[in-house]
Image (cartoon, rainbow, N blue to C red):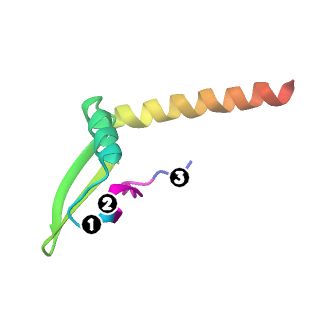
Amino acid sequence: MTHASRAAIIAIGSEMLGPLRSDTNSLWLTGKLEEAGYILCTKSFEGRVPKTEYRLSPAGRQALERYLEHMEALIHSTREH
């Protein structure tokens, strides 16, 4: 499996209404994932533009692997029937 070192959350929602608004669903989700220790957040600037990057933590990678294994088993068992 290929692992990306970081990800950008691209959301379509209220941020399209204006440059100063943000998607509260993405903010809530990333906050919960960070609280759970599944992602690490790095905030920086590119020029004057704020930039936020998220990376899976080791615990997040383990949780993702468990989830994928579970889903693969579910798919496999569904195809058997």
Viewer-nearest of labels 3 and 2? 2
- Residue furthest out toward the front: 17
- Which segment did they paint magenta? 4-16
On screen, residue 44 above or below 78: below
Dominant secondary-structure state across the stretch colored magenta: loop
On screen, residue 8 above or below 31: below
Q: Which residue is mark 3?
A: 2
At horizontal 78% and vertical 27% (from top left) the residue drawn is 78
Q: Amino acid at mark 3?
A: Thr
* Residue 19 % position (x, y): 24, 67
* Residue 3 % position (x, y): 47, 51
At horizontal 34% and vertical 35% (from top left) the residue drawn is 38
Q: CA distance from mark 2 to mark 1?
A: 6 Å
In the image, 26 versus 52, the foreground residue is 26
In the image, 11 versus 48, the foreground residue is 11
Quadrant location of residue 63?
top left
- Residue furthest out toward the left: 48
- Give the class, few, some or many, for how many residues have Cα within 10 Å of label 1's Cα (few <14, many ≥20): few
Quadrant location of residue 30?
top left
Q: Amino acid at mark 2?
A: Glu
Tag on residue 15? 2
Q: Is residue 50 magenta?
A: no
- Give the class, few, some or many, for how many residues have Cα within 10 Å of label 3's Cα (few <14, many ≥20): few
Tag on residue 18? 1
Q: Are marks 3 and 2 in contact (CB under 8 Å)?
A: no
At horizontal 35% and vertical 64% (from top left) the residue drawn is 16
* Residue 5 % position (x, y): 38, 54
